[in-house]
Amino acid sequence: DEQLRKEINEDREKNGKKPFRDKDGDGDGTGEAGEQREVIVSTTDPESGLFHKGEHKIEFAYTTHVACDKNNFILGLEVTPGNVHDSLIFDQVYDQVVERFPEVDTVVVDAGYKTPWICKKIIDDGRNPSMPYKRPLGKKGFFRSYEFVYDEYYNCVICPNNQVLPYVTTTREGYRQFKSDPNVCRSCPNLACCTESRVHQKVVQKHIWEDYLEKAEDFRHSAKGKATYTKRGETIERVFADAKEKHSMRYTNHRGLTRVTNWVRLKFAAMNLKKLAMWAFKNGLSPSFLARIHARRQKWALFLFETMPIL
């Protein structure tokens, strides 16, 4: 948050805008707290969170964020209430894994972790983010966001009708806003598939870290990016399936975040020991076998999977 706030203020000053003042709450910059919202709390286990699975399935649960290597050994995990978004826990899992295994070269994640900050963190650390295709948001029949091209030199956006949308401001969330001229848009032949604004003005937002998302997209199209992402089905998804089907991790009879976390860590430790025991049985527990395990660590890749609900 501090780094983002600093870069937002630098971007605003660069474009002749006043920097935002520091604030204690989530208000409008006056130091007052923002609008409060209601949170549904379980009377059975208040530490759990309301988990939304798809459009219709809603229940109180905990979620487990797990990282494993290409050999399905669990390297790190965090347990959170079910109402915590995937991307908010990435830093904790990522930091604990790369601290123990700095040789990690590629980080493979699902679409829930595809955010500007996560891309920036991975790339700035000298690693490759392997991420899936994420369908552009917006209504069917309207222009997609990638059809509005950002011109870095002039700091503006070019619309599909080759009109310029000049820079207006940078928001607290880190998005540069570009707005069109309503007088030009009013007579545009593509207005119906561009915006539904009553004042005929198109607003385009580009994050200040948008270039990191573009670098992640470039790696996705590379041979290495395609090869590493396809491994998810054989690695972290297999860990996910084994945990639920063979180790009864679909549900839990424990209450409280601490007890559930201890229970989950014990389960995954048992899965690691089971895999190591099977390797030892097949290969013989000898110095040469342990040396081969150590050698494989040198090219480990990190795999993160989508949150696993524990009801």
Image (cartoon, grey):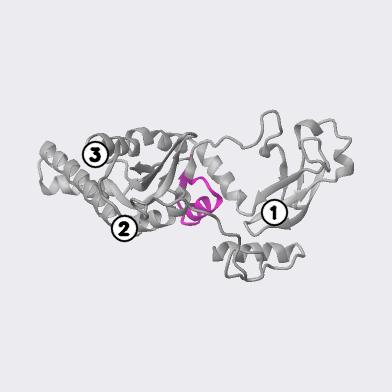
The question of residue 254 being in magenta is answered with no
Please tell me whether mark 3 sits on a helix, a strand or a loop: loop
Q: Give the foreground label among 2 and 3.
A: 3
Q: Residue at x 33, y 33 (%)?
A: 234
Q: Residues within 10 Å of mark 3 (few under 14, many from 20)?
A: few
**72 lies left or right of 98:** left
In the rendered image, which residue does mark 3 sit on? 248
Point out residue 260 in the picture as x, y percentages from the top left corner: 28, 52
Point out residue 145 in the picture as x, y percentages from the top left corner: 67, 39
Q: Residue at x 88, y 41 (%)?
A: 184
Distance CA(mark 1)–CA(mark 2)? 37 Å
Please tell me whether mark 1 sits on a helix, a strand or a loop: strand
**92 lies left or right of 192:** left
Distance CA(mark 2)–CA(mark 3)? 28 Å
Q: Which residues are magenta?
A: 113-131
Q: Give the foreground label among 1 and 2.
A: 1
The numbered disc on residue 100 is 2
Q: Earlier in the sequence, mark 2 or mark 3?
A: 2
In the rendered image, which residue does mark 1 sit on? 176
Point out residue 304 in the picture as x, y percentages from the top left corner: 39, 45
